Amino acid sequence: MASRGVVLGGPHAALPELARQVEAHGFDAAWVAETSHDSMIQAAVLAQATERIDIGTNITLAFPRSPTVTAMQAWDLNELSGDRFVVGLGSQVKRIIEERFSAAFDQPAKRMAEYVQAMRTVWRMERGEDATFRGDIYQVVRPGLTGPGTATDRALPRVNVAAVGPRMTAAAATHADGILGHPFTSAAYLADDVLPRIEEALVDAGRSRADFSICQGVILCVADDREVAIREAKQQIGFYGTTPNYRAVFESYGDGALTDQLRRVFKQSRADPGAMADAVPDEAVERYAVAGTPAEVRDRLPAIEQHVDHVILGGAWFGVGPERLAENLHAIVETFG
């Protein structure tokens, strides 16, 4: 069975207790996102509050940061956590990277491949190795101000890359320790599309599947009132489903037309969560999310888990209030701990 991690979020003051609960309930990892809060600061909080579980970012935005800065942060967090840190890198989308972060987004797969190589060069320097990296986009040719490091026996941080398309998947398979799958998925999409693509990319890179970790997110909504959970899942499916890059997920069950339908509703309703939920058919919840009562979701999660090494359990957030976010997190911990 796949190992299990839980997505944590919210005020920084609440994170330590949440992390301790996740660890006490026997989970293997706690993950943080980078939406309204910096992922590295959240990870530092979780690392200090726990002793056993892995701490990962899903995701840390790569392109707004220098790869050297990210490598230094990951190196320090791995030391702070006792070699439990996983830095998960993501590209985000062009519009957000350019319009919010004023950063470049051209050639995202190539940029990510060079980014990971540059980070690894920084870590090799920290271990005292004579290492440099000169790419077309990034370069690391100089160690820190005090020269090469002396931590020759230090473990390297693990680095995963979030990928959807074939080029980013190839970048992850060639240069990273693992891949982070988007929570908008289906069992059929994983089996028929994602896994063969990863296997092909690993073969091309000359790497073993045993040395590569497939970490998969899931839209997981749990409530004693199953209609509440179903409604939240529909809202999230509706939001993700407006993105053309995710059309292949819908096509895994012949629902490709839903993408254009949801885009129209999104625009006409001005992104109203209720309207988005109404536009998502009941069968879509069965195909693209895990939602329902505790007993129902327990029975359904293995359909996803059987395909991956690690499953990242996180709930819907589009149109969901803080109280329900907390209730869903509590339900996830109690149901799967």
Image (cartoon, grey):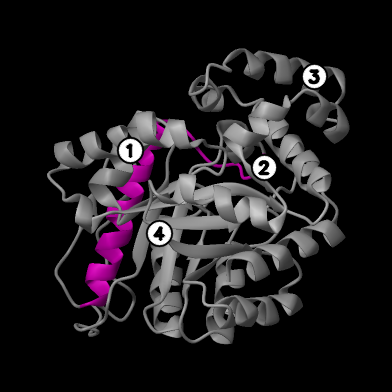
The quadrant in which the C terminus is found is bottom right
Q: Which residues are magenta?
A: 100-127
**Residue placed under numbered mark 4 in the picture:** 2
Residue 4 percent across, percent down from the top left: 48, 63
Mark sitting earlier along the chain (1/4): 4
30 and 99: which one is in front?
30
**Residue placed under numbered mark 2 in the picture:** 100
Give the alpha-carbon distance from disc 1 to disc 4, as whole Å. Answer: 15 Å
Mark sitting earlier along the chain (3/4): 4
Residue 215 percent across, percent down from the top left: 42, 53
> Can you say whether 221 is above or below 335 in the image?
above
> Can you say whether 94 is above or below 154 in the image?
above
Mark 1: few/some/many CA within 10 Å (<14, 14-19, 20+): some
Mark sitting earlier along the chain (2/3): 2
**Residue placed under numbered mark 1 in the picture:** 195
Find numbered disc 1 in the image and state the secondary structure of the residue it sits on: helix
**Residue placed under numbered mark 3 in the picture:** 265
Q: Residue at x 58, y 65 (%)?
A: 336
Give the alpha-carbon distance from disc 2 to disc 1, as whole Å. Answer: 33 Å
Mark sitting earlier along the chain (2/4): 4
Observer-side mark, 1 or 4, equals 4
Give the alpha-carbon distance from disc 3 to disc 1, as whole Å. Answer: 32 Å
Find numbered disc 2 in the image and state the secondary structure of the residue it sits on: loop
Amino acid at the residue labelled 3: Val
Give the alpha-carbon distance from disc 3 to disc 4, as whole Å. Answer: 37 Å
Give the alpha-carbon distance from disc 2 to disc 4, as whole Å. Answer: 36 Å
Observer-side mark, 2 or 4, equals 4
- Quarter of the image holding residue 255? top right
